[in-house]
Image (spheres, rainbow, N blue to C red):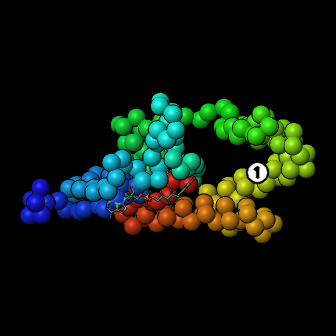
Amino acid sequence: MSESDLTVDVIVVGAGHNALITAGYLAKAGLEVAVLEAKSIIGGNTVTEELTFEGWQHDSCSSAHAVIQSNPVIRDDELGLISKYGLRYVHTEPAAVLPLEDGDAFVLHRSTEGTAAEIARFSRQDATRFVEMVGEWNSALKFALAGGAIPDRLDRASRWVGFRVARSQRCARGSLSRGHRPGHGHG
Ligand SMILES: Cc1cc2nc3c(=O)[nH]c(=O)nc-3n(C[C@H](O)[C@H](O)[C@H](O)COP(=O)(O)OP(=O)(O)OC[C@H]3O[C@@H](n4cnc5c(N)ncnc54)[C@H](O)[C@@H]3O)c2cc1C
């Protein structure tokens, strides 16, 4: 294809998830969009690849799709990713397993209690602190999702999580009020 054949309305450079979401919204708005990706696989840092053994698929950047769940692109399925294209999150139990050098393994569970019990095998103090930390994170999340201020009593890490969520929510809300523009970030 020569340059003169390129008659699209918008060219998006790079096919990371932010670019793809942007391109999806532009296409939904009726524009003709071309996405140019340098690699042979699309998705940027959200790709799944065979990195070790044949048949074993890896999330190359080990990304956590947490905050994006409250973004309109997922929450309200604005681009039909769930209803039309079959996006489905698989929540495993256990959530993650870390093999240790001595043959033991550290197992992360979906429940706070399960993970705390696992941490307690190594340190009861850390297990207690973990439960406290999750409680604080959940408080921060609740305030942020409701659009409120993050309480001062939360520690620095929890406040950081809260602010990150609040910022994401502001992006989503601002995007909608400005006329249906996508938010960003898959955290
Ligand atoms: C190890 C790791 C773990 C992460 N974990 C998380 C997480 O858990 N949660 C979270 O929210 N964020 C996480 N992030 C950050 C998140 O992955 C990035 O913020 C996000 O991928 C950025 O998306 P993007 O679409 O803007 O760009 P990218 O995902 O970086 O994609 C850019 C794409 O553009 C292509 N490209 C670049 N230049 C050109 C060019 N000139 N021409 C054509 N194509 C080009 C690249 O090949 C690539 O495919 C992680 C990042 C890393 C590295």
Q: In which quarter of the image is residue 108?
A: top right
Residue 137 on image: x %, y %: 72, 55
Q: Quadrant of residue 179?
A: bottom left
Residue at position x 36%, y 47% in the image:
41
**Residue 156 placement (x, y as % from top left):** 75, 67
Residue 108 lies left or right of residue 72; in this view the side is right
User: Circle 1: is it few (<14), some (14-19), or many (20+) Cα within 10 Å?
Assistant: few
Q: Is residue 60 visible?
A: yes
Q: Mark 1 points at which residue?
A: 134
**Can residue 111 be seen in the rendering of this structure?**
no
Q: Where is residue 64 in the image (x, y as percent from the top left)?
A: 58, 49
Image coordinates for residue 3, horizontal then vertical, percent: 12, 63
At mark 1, the secondary structure is: helix
Q: Which of 156 and 168 is in front in this view?
A: 156
Residue nearer the viewer, 109 or 142: 109
Q: Quadrant of the C terminus?
A: bottom right
Q: Nearer the viewer, residue 112 or 167?
A: 112
Residue at 46% of width from left, 42% of height from top?
48
91 vs 21, left or right, is right
17 lies left or right of 170 = left
Three-letter residue code for mark 1: Val
